[in-house]
């Protein structure tokens, strides 16, 4: 049974080099949502801000082993793994020392595939969700090289598509040179306010351009969703009745349905 689970583990990178679009919120709540739906999930925090780590209730200052030591080969992936308060959800935490990882990796041979090699040793998980840094550096390249696919959160604001072409271009380069199976899993519209004409227009424009790649579920602006990271918990544990929780659970279901259709 373990062999089958290992073989079918899917690795999903959540990426957007534009900050403030709900990238980490999406990574945390997709991982937690999938765990609620009875999937065994590993959340890998690859962002030096360590917001995904604190967002599931783990203090970056309290962990002794992080993705930083794992990437440098000091420890194994399993040694860095910690349980979270959400049943079925494990975490490989990050710390601010990850800020210098590009310089550390630069002299290494095969520096772009370090994370992929590490995740190949993983057993017993249905999904790995990677919270990528808000940049297009070596850590993001590692995330894309390790991933089967990419979820791109897009904020429903005027500059929503700004920088998206650069990210898509990077994905194409990684696909061509390092990871032929890589594809865009989908685009998720975040911070959507249906009461504004701008929000509606941005959502319509994205759907016209990207068609079926855009998830039907949209994530609304929601104060409880904004508050939950400061309480160190995914939205489902902070306020399960909120619009934010309802939307991320609907997104998790849609994601799971798409993936099951592919298999």
Image (cartoon, rainbow, N blue to C red):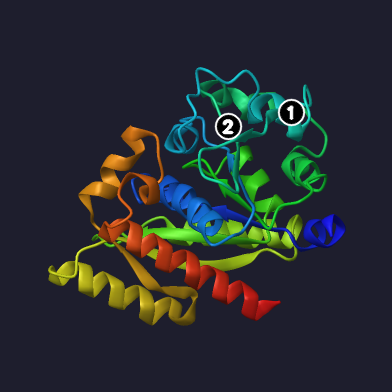
Residue 74 lies, in percent from the top left, at 77, 21
Residue 100 lies, in percent from the top left, at 58, 23
The reply to whether residue 161 is in sight is: no
For the residues labelled 2 and 1, the Cα–Cα distance comes to: 11 Å
Residue 5 lies, in percent from the top left, at 78, 59
What kind of element bears circle 2? loop
Using the rendered view, name the quadrant where residue 196 is placed.
bottom left
Observer-nearest residue: 162 or 210? 210
The reply to whether residue 162 is in sight is: yes
Q: Residue at x 47, y 47 (%)?
A: 28
Using the rendered view, name the quadrant where residue 185 is placed.
bottom right
Q: Residue at x 43, y 73 (%)?
A: 215
Q: Looking at the rendered structure, which numbered label has been put on residue 79?
A: 1
Residue on which the image places disc 2? 93
- The relative height of residue 223 versus residue 176 in the rendered view (above or below) is above
Left or right of 143? Residue 164 is: left
Left or right of 67? Residue 233 is: left
Residue 245 lies, in percent from the top left, at 34, 57
């Amino acid at each position: 049974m373990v062999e089958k689970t290992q073989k079918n583990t899917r690795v999903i990178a959540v990426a957007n080099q534009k900050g403030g679009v709900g990238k980490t919120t999406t990574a945390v709540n997709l991982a937690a949502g999938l765990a609620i739906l009875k999937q065994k999930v590993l959340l890998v925090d690859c962002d030096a801000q360590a917001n995904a780590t604190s967002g599931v209730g783990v203090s970056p200052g309290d962990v002794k082993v992080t993705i930083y030591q794992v990437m440098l080969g000091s420890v194994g992936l399993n040694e860095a793994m910690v349980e979270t308060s959400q049943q079925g959800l494990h975490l490989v935490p990050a710390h601010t020392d990850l800020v210098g990882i590009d310089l550390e990796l630069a002299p290494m041979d095969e520096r772009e595939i370090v994370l992929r090699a590490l995740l190949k040793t993983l057993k017993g998980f249905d999904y790995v969700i990677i919270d990528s840094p808000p940049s297009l550096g070596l850590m993001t390249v590692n995330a894309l090289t390790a991933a089967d696919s990419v979820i791109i959160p897009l904020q429903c604001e005027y500059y929503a598509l700004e920088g998206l072409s650069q990210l898509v271009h990077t994905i194409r380069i990684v696909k061509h040179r390092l990871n032929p199976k890589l594809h865009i899993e989908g685009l998720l519209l975040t911070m959507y306010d249906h009461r504004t004409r701008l929000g509606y227009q941005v959502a319509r424009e994205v759907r016209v351009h990207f068609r079926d790649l855009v998830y039907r579920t949209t994530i609304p602006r929601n104060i409880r969703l904004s508050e939950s990271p400061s309480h160190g918990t995914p939205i489902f544990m902070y306020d399960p009745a909120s619009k934010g929780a309802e939307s991320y659970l609907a997104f998790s279901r849609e994601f799971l349905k798409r993936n099951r259709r592919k298999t």
